[in-house]
Structures are given as structure tokens and as C-alpha cells.
Amino acid sequence: MKIIVAKNYREMSKIAADLVVRQIKRKPASVLGLATGHTPFELYDDLVQAYRRGKVSFKKVKTFNLDEYAGLGENNRSSCHYYMKNKFFKKVDLSKKNIFIPDGRAADLKKECAAYERKIRRAGGVDLQILGIGLDGHIGFNEPGSNFSSKTRLVKLAESTRRANAKYFGGRALVPQSAVTMGLGTILKAKKVILLASGREKAAIVKLTLRGKADKITPASVLRKHPQVTVILDKTAAELIKLPK
Ligand code: PGA
């Protein structure tokens, strides 16, 4: 596991964007695993900039998003799909047929989950997965207690997650109770992973993830079993871990 400490959020985002651009240059038909939330906000801005400057093309890239709230579709302003569409998809040359996000409005969400796993497999698996981390250690919406071998499935959201995401919904009561998420086993199959964390409020969970026990209580600790993870932290998120000089 490689750990990079950036001086701030801006630099963290830039380092991550450079790694994504490098991945696509090496393999233009890369399969990217994408995340929503506040953390990758400027990473997407940087990728859009790189595209506008002609440094990268997403024409052959396929994207698979980690998760979606149950019951929400792409036109709901709080959905992951809406975020991605406005933040990234419509600003670059990704082909619509190459964009995959679980459909939170599917009539049969169980079937939707199984189909999503198949689609990832058929695409040849994720080459590079981007992840943020929740205050409780979730990655995707894999809350504490998730099995390390779990697949894409319907999960109940932890109250702390609903509280943290209330800002996107105009109040906690409006945050859905459940979501569809790639599983920890799904994430583990990605060939490479980038985990991002920014801000002092993430410092404790970053420490637990990287230095605590690797178990179900801290879902992100599953990444310690992965051979190709790059963790990019800003200074404040890294302030509780000791790093070799
Ligand atoms: P955040 O969310 O990027 O908004 O902090 C991270 C997450 O919940 O995975």
C-alpha cells in the first residue's frame, strides 16, 4: 500500500487526477470505478480540465459507479447519477453506452445488483477504482459489518451515513434508508485502487483503516488485502498516522 500525503485538498485532487490520466494513457479503454461525495469533487474538475486541454480522452473508457440510493433515479438532484452527470459525464467525451450506475429505481433491485456484477465482469473488471471513505469506514455504501467477500447488493444505510449525507437531501429524514452498492469483494477485484481522504474529521477513521485491525468493523481495512492500493491523504486527514520519513 502506497501512502501519499498531499499538502491540501487541492493537491490531493491533482495527484489523483494525474494517476487517472496516466491510467487512461496507458490503456485508453480503461474501466474506471467511480465514487461520489464531497471528496472526489475537484478530482472530477481536474479530469474535465485535462480533457478540455486535450490531455486525455474518455472515448473508449467505461465507468462503473460504486453506488446509488434506493428509489432515486438520474433526475433526482440527490442521486449519485445526477451528481455524476452534472459533475463529469456531460463535460467529457464519455460515450453514454459506456456509463454504468446501479439503477436505484429498478423494479427488482436484487436482479439489478446481480446484473450490475455481470456487467462489471463482462467489461473485463475495473482497472482503477476511486474511493472516498465514510466517517464509519464505509467504502461505497459498505457499512461496518459488511463481509469482505460481499458483492453488489442492497444495503441499509447506517444512521451516521444518513446524518453525514443529509446536506444533499435537505434533512436527514429525506435520506433514503437503503442503497445499492458494489460489495467489498467487488471492490477488491479492481486491479488498482485509489483511496482518497481529506479533512481532520477523517483522521481517526484513516488511522483505524491503515493501522488498526483489518476486520469487518472497519470496511475500508479490506484494502489492506489488496496488492495495488494508493492512499492519497491531505495533511489533516493524515495527522494521526506516523509515516516513515
Ligand atoms: P464524502 O463521503 O466524500 O462526502 O466525505 C465519503 C463517503 O461517504 O464515502
Image (tube, rainbow, N blue to C red):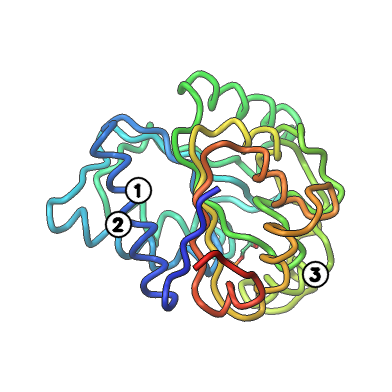
Q: Residue at x 65, y 39 (%)?
A: 182
- Contact flag, marks 2 and 1 (Cβ < 8 Å): yes
Name the residue carrying label 3: 160
Name the residue carrying label 1: 20
Q: Residue at x 21, y 57 (%)?
A: 50
- State the image quarter where residue 128 is shown: top left
Please, what is the three-letter code of the amino acid marked with disc 3? Ser
Q: Residues within 10 Å of mark 1 (few under 14, many from 20)?
A: many
Q: Position of residue 98 (x, y in %)?
A: 38, 33
Which disc number belongs to residue 124? none
Q: CA distance from mark 1 to mark 3?
A: 30 Å
Q: Nearest to the eye among marks 2 and 1: give it.
A: 1
Disc 2 or 1, which lies upstream in sequence? 1
- State the image quarter where residue 87 is shown: bottom left
Please, what is the three-letter code of the amino acid marked with disc 2? Leu
Please, what is the three-letter code of the amino acid marked with disc 1? Val
